[in-house]
Amino acid sequence: MALSLSRYVEILREKLANSIFLPFLEVLPQAMLEQALQDEGISYRKRLYTPLITLWTWLCQVLDKDKSCKNAVSRVISYIAASGEAPPSSDTGAYCKARKRLKEGFLLRLLRRTGKHLHQQSEKLGELWCGRRVFIADGSTITMADTQDNQEEYPQPESQAEGCGFPMANIVALFCLKTGALLEAAISAITTHELNLFRSLYQYLQPGDVALGDRLYGSYADICLLQSRGVDCVFRMHWRRKTDFRRGKILGYYDHIVHWTKPQRCPQGLDPILFAQLPQEIVLREVRFLVATKGFRPQVITLVTTLLDAELYPKEALAELYSWRWDIEIDLRHLKTTMQMEHLSSKTPHMVRNEFYVHLLAYNLIRTLMFQASVEHEIAPLSISFQATIQHLSNFTYALAYADAQHRSYLYDTLLYLVSKERLLIRPGRVEPRLKKRRPKSYGWLQKPRKQLQKKLIA
């Protein structure tokens, strides 16, 4: 049995590494993975689902439309059976226990390494904005299985009746402007404000970086905190703050430098001691421009930024930069809708975070493949379809797993070519109503806990 188990592990390590993990082989070599396991104190006995096999199988699972553990185990069995070995048990218990044994720190190490590597590759190719690295920040929410453990750590919104809602978490992520790679992310209960999650990610920004975000992040305190780290920012002006372009140092049409004074009260969620250390006044630049959309009234956009030099950072460049902020909305949609991360099925907080980080790692896997295709065929990485890349990789995995080295190289080159041809259509002025034609099933909403309704039906 020990010999058979060793054979199973050997087969799966080879097949999964040469298929689903192939885009990551250069970024996450075997030696690095083993070192990461050792650093995190992850040890394991001889078993079929080693940490690496579990991770690779989980990546397949989150990229598949059928995300059940039964389907993931079936994939593992198919690899072993195709190699001429007797298939192992189809019971999912061993795989589910192996997923629980993975530590969050191990997954975070891999996520940060893949995001950083992809971002550095874009820098080497000169993919910078005005010679600066730009990170886009934004937040969203996700739900998870309605269990007692999840409710205690990630309580549902108070507006939902007990037993009728789902535990909910706030998430904030930092994305690379040029490649769409996810570099850092934070998750917490919805009682933790999105701004506080964003502040927890400050430590991963380096002096000289530029942070880009919407109006939520453009507060006096956050601009000061970023400046103290040598990080510049470009945020949309908060709707409550009034701007008078007749004052300050005029740089151009709707473009001036002004002085902001420190608020009298400490913002909610910020440490009062930290607030007391903020400067009494900061110098900022405010810019306003119009965004014209066919069929709609022009939209007025006002930005606040610490980039004061109008020659190095002209108004037109800032307007173009902010127009790219919409990419993060698309990136979050890829995670939540395309990869179905909007609702996680895990029943404990530890597994919720593990599932969350594996989804982010799988997202970077697809972005890495898209970047490799863009470099190989000289196109912009963000012009490639994310959904089509997942489809091509999923359909090529089995062929890649059982090809020899020469044929695998040919298959991978073909995969990169196909991915590069999946270009996003540019349709300016296209509008669609946010309505569905197909009618939903005529089921009502759950107004009481399910167990109460079950007892009522039995009675």
Image (spheres, grey):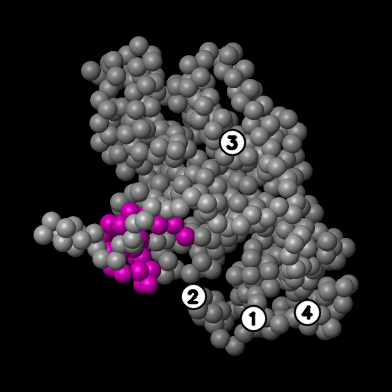
Residue at image mark 2: 269
Q: Dot 4 lies on which element? A: strand
Quarter-of-image position of residue 245? bottom right
Quarter of the picture containing the N terminus is top left
Q: Gap between marks 4 and 3, in whole Å?
A: 47 Å
Q: Which residues are magenta?
A: 141-167
First of labels 1, 2 by sequence position = 1
Disc number at residue 258? 4
Q: Specify which label sits upstream in the sequence, 3 or 1.
A: 1
Image quarter in which the C terminus is found: bottom left
Q: Is residue 423 left or right of residue 221?
A: right
Quadrant housing residue 259: bottom right
The amino acid type, in three-letter code, at marker 3 is Ala
| Labels 4 and 3 touching (C-beta < 8 A) | no
Spatial separation of the CA atoms under disc 1 and disc 2 = 19 Å
Give the residue type at disc 2.
Answer: Gly
The mark that comes first in sequence, 2 or 3, is 2
For marks 3 and 1, give the one nearer the viewer. 3
Which residue is nearer to you in this view: 427 or 19? 427
Position of residue 9 measured from the top left corner of the image (x, y, whole percent): 35, 23
Tell me, yes or no, if residue 153 can be seen here.
Answer: no
In this view, 125 is above or below 279: above
> For the point 82% across and 84% down, which residue is it?
247
As drawn, the label of residue 240 is 1
Label 1, residues with CA under 10 Å away: few <14, some 14-19, many ≥20? few
The residue indicated by pointer 3 is 388
Q: Secondary structure at mark 3?
A: helix
Q: Say left or right for 386 vs 72.
A: right
